[in-house]
Structure formats: structure tokens, C-alpha cells
């Protein structure tokens, strides 16, 4: 499947909602706090974004926004344990899963900080250095990833991938949720291969003049509903249907993506 300029413009429009005027991302991330990355990642699944934001805001109100994994663990210990910490600091008693008798997510957070301590990880930089380019899943997965997924109710790896996204890692797994994102608006699912998804993301990053990592983070967080697009935002009306058929195109519209011509037409200046 060829990567068409209409697909690039469609993805760019969906990403622009989460970019500032200077191209600075407004997706969720905590490059200066591994503690906040851990909190957000472990409270993400099954939670509304507002509930996650509340957990993070309550913690930062108490401790600031630069805590590492060690400081997060100290916070839990100082409160008297996970349950007291959940009641007094983050005001959230959500369980780790829906089965009766499930432990609190706060307990999973505490255990996650121990995983980090066991691997000598305290900061975001420590985490990124420990993970490197090693895979996050499968037989050859990074040892930190394996230890994280052994935490209660974290076997799926969703919270681990969320952690990496929040930390600014280049890791990006194209699972069913991500492929679902590239659905009807792009006229591609399920025909789009992983390589084609990555090619489209790369072309869109070039089009928007941002790092590829930024587009990956936005796509992943929308796919997992950590970011919620504005339902009232005006839809993008392109000059022809979004499908894989090669309709007759206007002369001003390039037939396919060419990075050398990216700035060659005024119509490419913005996806809006």
C-alpha cells in the first residue's frame, strides 16, 4: 500500500490537536519524574483520563513534579503503607483488578518501585538506559520489562508500554489498539502492515516538523484513550474520499508523499 498524502494529512490533523503552536507536544509525559510515570502507567488501565490526572495532581501537590522511583517509595512508606497512602495522598482506592479481594493499585505501585530499586533505576534516564533497544515483549524481552510484567495484574504489558511512552522512549508496539486507530479514517485497516504504519508515522512527523517519537506517543495515547480528542472539533474535509483508490486529484495536490516537496506548496503548511 502506498502512503498517500491524504493519509498523512489525516493523521497530521488528528495529531495537531495535541501539539502547541511551536510544535511542542501536549501529550502526556513526565521526562523529569519516573515516579509520576509509574503512577500514571499503573492507574491508566480501566480509568478515565480525569481520574488519572487527579492521582498525579494530588501527588504533585504533596511532593512536586520531579520525584524519582525512590522518592515515590519513600512517600508510601512515610504514609504508613500503600492503603494509608492511597487514602491520604492520592485519594484513590482503585483495586488492581475487578475480582473480589483484589489488592489496591497503590500496592502495585509500591511493588513497582521495588522493581526499579532492584535494577538500580531511580530516574527516567536510568530507565531509558536500562531498557535501551531491547524488546519489551517475547522471549528476549528486557529483564526490567519481564520483572514489571510479573507485577500483579500487569501481565498484558499495557502498563509497561504506557510507562515507556510517558518516559519518552522510542519503543512503540503496533498492537490491535494501534491498528484500530488506523481504521476507517485512513481507509487502511486491516490491510496496513506494521512497516506501513511506521512509514506513515514517519512521514507525518516530517510533515508536522516534529520528532517521530512525538507522533508515536500521540497515536499510542489516543489508541488507549489516555488522550481524548475533542468531540466538538471540526472534522477534516479532504477533497476526495479517504480510501485506497486513486481518484483524480487536483493539480495542487501532490499524488504521493515526497519529503523534498514538503515545503513546496502552501497547502502543506498546516493540516488544519
Image: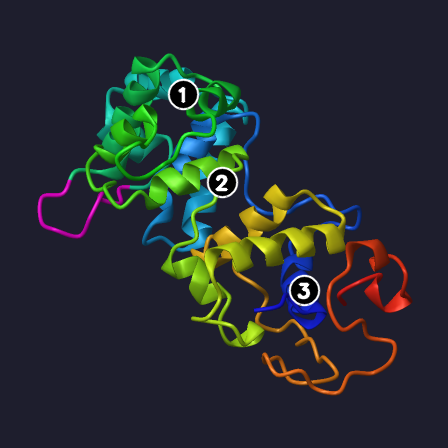
> What mark, if any, has residue 165 been given in the picture?
2
- Closest to the camera, between mark 2 and mark 1, is 2
- Tell me the distance, in whole angstroms, between the alpha carbons under discs 1 and 3: 38 Å
In the rendered image, residue 145, in percent from the top left (x then y), is placed at: 32, 31
185 sits left or right of 106 in the view? right
Residue located beneath label 1 in the image:
69
- Determine whether 164 is above or below 223 in the image: above
What's the mark number on residue 8?
3
Q: Which residue occupies the extreme front position in the image?
A: 1
Q: In the figure, residue 159 lies in which quadrant? A: top left
Compared to residue 134, the image places residue 46 above or below, namely: below
Span colored in magenta: 93-102
Q: Position of residue 54 (x, y in %)?
A: 45, 44
Residue 100: say if magenta.
Answer: yes
Q: Residue at x 20, y 48 (%)?
A: 97
Closest to the camera, between mark 1 and mark 3, is 3
Amino acid at each position: 500500500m502506498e502512503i498517500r498524502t491524504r493519509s498523512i494529512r489525516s493523521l497530521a490533523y488528528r495529531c495537531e490537536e495535541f501539539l502547541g503552536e511551536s510544535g511542542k507536544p501536549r501529550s502526556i509525559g513526565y521526562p523529569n519524574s519516573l515516579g509520576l510515570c509509574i503512577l500514571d502507567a499503573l492507574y491508566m488501565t480501566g480509568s478515565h483520563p480525569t481520574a488519572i490526572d487527579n492521582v498525579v495532581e494530588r501527588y504533585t501537590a504533596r511532593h512536586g513534579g520531579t520525584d524519582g522511583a525512590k522518592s515515590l517509595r519513600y512517600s508510601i512508606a512515610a504514609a504508613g503503607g500503600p492503603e494509608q497512602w492511597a487514602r491520604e495522598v492520592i485519594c484513590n482506592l482503585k483495586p488492581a483488578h475487578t475480582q473480589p479481594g483484589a489488592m489496591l493499585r497503590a500496592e502495585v505501585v509500591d511493588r513497582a518501585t521495588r522493581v526499579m530499586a532492584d535494577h538500580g533505576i531511580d530516574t527516567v534516564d536510568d530507565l531509558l538506559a536500562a531498557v535501551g533497544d531491547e524488546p519489551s515483549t517475547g522471549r528476549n524481552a528486557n529483564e526490567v520489562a519481564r520483572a514489571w510484567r510479573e507485577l500483579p495484574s500487569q501481565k498484558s504489558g499495557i502498563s509497561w508500554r504506557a510507562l515507556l511512552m510517558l518516559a519518552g522512549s522510542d519503543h512503540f508496539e503496533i498492537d490491535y489498539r494501534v491498528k484500530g486507530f488506523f481504521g476507517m479514517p485512513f481507509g487502511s485497516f486491516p490491510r496496513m502492515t506494521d512497516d506501513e504504519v511506521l512509514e506513515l508515522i514517519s512521514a507525518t512527523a516530517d510533515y508536522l516538523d516534529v520528532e517521530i517519537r512525538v507522533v508515536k506517543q500521540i497515536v499510542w495515547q489516543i489508541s488507549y484513550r489516555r488522550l481524548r480528542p475533542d468531540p466538538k472539533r471540526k472534522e477534516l474535509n479532504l477533497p476526495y474520499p479517504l480510501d485506497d483508490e486513486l481518484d483524480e486529484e487536483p493539480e495542487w495536490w501532490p499524488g504521493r508523499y515526497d519529503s523534498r516537496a514538503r515545503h513546496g506548496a502552501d497547502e502543506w503548511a498546516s493540516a488544519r
